[in-house]
Image (cartoon, grey):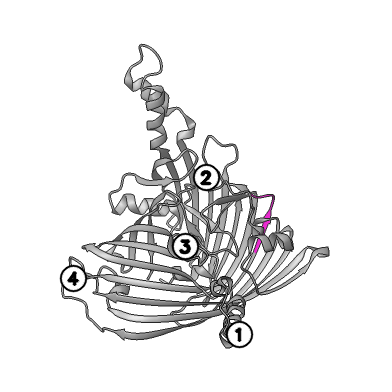
């Protein structure tokens, strides 16, 4: 199987995000904004295929999810696959809101009508359509390199179903993705969800490598006025500029270089299947990414006031042509990643401890201007302002993973926020995502992940493949 794009690439490429807000289980990050912590991922199995795998090979009759909707609660998912040809996967994914059902029973009582049995009372509650949601998925392998997925999602208590069509093609050194959704679901840096009546995108990305150049070309078109999705984190009235009607064409190029500070060439233990083939060798390493991105906007999304309001930290090249509703944005970016691992994840207990730290500089222009200003202040023996120091501070994320026992490990990802204006606590944890991972040994490098986001109050169980 071709190596998939790593999760870390999502900081610069617009990869989908995992979310329990819909049955389909994915959302698109708001273009131009950093991804929410812990939910970015590369190409993966569709949600119905994940549930089908969990049911067949992990003896999971129901898969739980929990989302921060206005009617929050624990939901159970189960899939029914329909037998068709070998290259055609058809499934019906159903979701039942268990917590909403329990709340209805507590509020209205188990038996609503007199002289009715408890079984009839439960049947009356189960007739509430708001408890159910369905997703019909058809995924066809047209050729060994072409895949077409069509899905329709209906919450039964809402009028407009959610429809999506995705076409993927594998070139020898590139991946092509064409996607259309009605409505499209987007997630912002603060975890708020937005719906766009119609959304279409075309992406061409070079196949990722551990070290070397890579590039990404994309075109995104939105139609209709975006509105907040019905979640508790969507009270914000400021619509992201990149979601307004219009067309955005983006090109990005990056060069990545890995540095091995120390690496152990440990071998596999006899008669022991490794939990993850990518985690066999303890090491201390670092890597750096530097690149540039340019975006052309045509439509309402190019209004200068909207861009300045939604991209307050942007200081790169910005050309605006109001008469023809167009704009051009360009800037450089950089990232530094440090990784350390102890253990080879083969023994029964505490044979894996991993630590990762990542520093991101999303605007090279802002970093350069801040560095020049700091140099001038030191040269003339002046005290640098807090704004100048803040401009050179990167955004940071840290990750810690520890084996608990056997294939089970615990992981926590945290984003570190630096705010020098906050005198009592200038450095603090902005958000964290906690996860329990179960390594699927027979698949080489795959895992079932149960993750929880306290800020968004979201919980999800999913499969992930070929992630470091």
Q: Is residue 434 left or right of residue 317?
A: left
Q: Is residue 155 left or right of residue 353?
A: right
Q: Residues within 10 Å of mark 2 (few under 14, many from 20)?
A: some
Q: Answer with mark 1 or mark 4, whichever residue precedes in sequence.
A: 4
Q: Are marks 4 and 3 in contact (CB under 8 Å)?
A: no
Q: Which residue is mark 2?
A: 231
Separation (CA) of disc 1 from disc 3: 39 Å
Disc 3 is placed on an element classified as loop
Q: Is residue 361 left or right of residue 468?
A: right
Q: Is residue 153 visible?
A: yes
Q: Which residue is mark 4?
A: 272
Residue 149 vs 34, above or below: the answer is: above
Residue at 38%, 51% (x, y): give it: 51
Separation (CA) of disc 4 from disc 3: 32 Å
Residue 225: say if magenta. Answer: yes
Q: Are marks 1 and 4 in contact (CB under 8 Å)?
A: no
Q: Answer with mark 1 or mark 3, whichever residue precedes in sequence.
A: 3
Q: Which residue is mark 1?
A: 376
Separation (CA) of disc 2 from disc 4: 46 Å
Disc 2 is placed on an element classified as loop
Disc 4 is placed on an element classified as loop
Q: Answer with mark 3 or mark 2, whichever residue precedes in sequence.
A: 3
Q: Residues within 10 Å of mark 3 (few under 14, many from 20)?
A: many
Q: In the image, which disc is placed on residue 40?
A: 3
Judge depth for marks 3 and 2 and give the one in front: 2
Q: Answer with mark 1 or mark 2, whichever residue precedes in sequence.
A: 2
Residue at 60%, 85% (x, y): give it: 376
Q: Answer with mark 2 or mark 4, whichever residue precedes in sequence.
A: 2
Q: Are marks 1 and 2 in contact (CB under 8 Å)?
A: no
Q: Quadrant of residue 85?
A: bottom left
Q: Is residue 439 visible?
A: no
């Amino acid at each position: 199987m071709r190596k998939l794009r790593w999760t870390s690439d999502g900081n610069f490429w617009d990869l989908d995000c995992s979310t329990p807000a819909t049955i389909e289980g994915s959302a698109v990050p708001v273009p131009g904004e950093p991804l929410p912590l812990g939910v970015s991922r590369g190409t993966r199995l569709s949600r119905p295929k994940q549930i089908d795998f969990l049911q067949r090979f992990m003896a999971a009759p129901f898969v739980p999810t929990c989302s921060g909707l206005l009617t929050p609660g624990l939901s159970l998912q189960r899939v029914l696959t329909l037998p068709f040809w070998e290259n055609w996967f058809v499934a019906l994914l159903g979701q039942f809101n268990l917590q909403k059902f329990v709340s209805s029973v507590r509020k209205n009582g188990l038996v609503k009508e007199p002289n009715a049995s408890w079984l009839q009372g439960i049947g009356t509650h189960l007739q509430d359509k708001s408890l159910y949601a369905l997703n019909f998925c058809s995924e066809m392998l047209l050729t060994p390199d072409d895949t077409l997925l069509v899905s329709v999602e209906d919450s039964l208590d809402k009028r407009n179903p959610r429809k999506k069509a995705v076409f993927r093609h594998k070139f020898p050194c590139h991946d092509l993705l064409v996607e259309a959704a009605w409505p499209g679901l987007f997630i912002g840096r603060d975890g708020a969800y937005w719906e766009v009546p119609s959304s279409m995108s075309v992406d061409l990305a070079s196949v990722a490598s551990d070290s070397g150049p890579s590039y990404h070309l994309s075109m995104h078109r939105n139609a209709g006025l975006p509105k907040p999705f019905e979640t508790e984190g969507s009270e914000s009235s400021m619509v992201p500029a990149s979601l307004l009607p219009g067309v955005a064409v983006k090109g990005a190029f990056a060069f990545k270089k890995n540095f091995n500070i120390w690496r152990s060439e440990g071998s596999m233990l006899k008669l022991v299947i490794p939990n993850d083939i990518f985690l066999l060798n303890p090491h201390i390493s670092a890597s750096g990414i530097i690149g540039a991105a340019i975006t052309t906007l045509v439509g309402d999304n190019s209004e200068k006031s909207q861009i300045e309001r939604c991209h307050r930290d942007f200081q790169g090249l910005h050309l605006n042509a109001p008469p023809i509703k167009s704009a051009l944005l360009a800037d450089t970016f950089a990232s530094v990643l440090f990784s350390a691992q102890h253990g080879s994840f083969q023994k029964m207990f505490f044979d894996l401890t991993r630590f990762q730290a990542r520093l991101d500089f999303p605007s090279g222009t802002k970093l350069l201007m801040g560095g020049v200003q700091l140099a001038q202040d030191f040269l003339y023996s002046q005290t640098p302002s807090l704004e100048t120091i803040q401009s050179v501070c990167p955004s940071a994320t840290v990750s810690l993973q520890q084996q608990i026992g056997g294939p089970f490990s615990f992981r926590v990802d945290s984003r570190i926020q630096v705010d020098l204006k906050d005198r009592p606590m200038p450095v603090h944890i902005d958000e964290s995502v906690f996860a329990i991972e179960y390594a699927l040994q027979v698949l080489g490098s795959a895992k079932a992940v149960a993750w929880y986001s306290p800020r968004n109050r979201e919980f999800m169980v999913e499969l992930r493949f070929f992630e470091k």
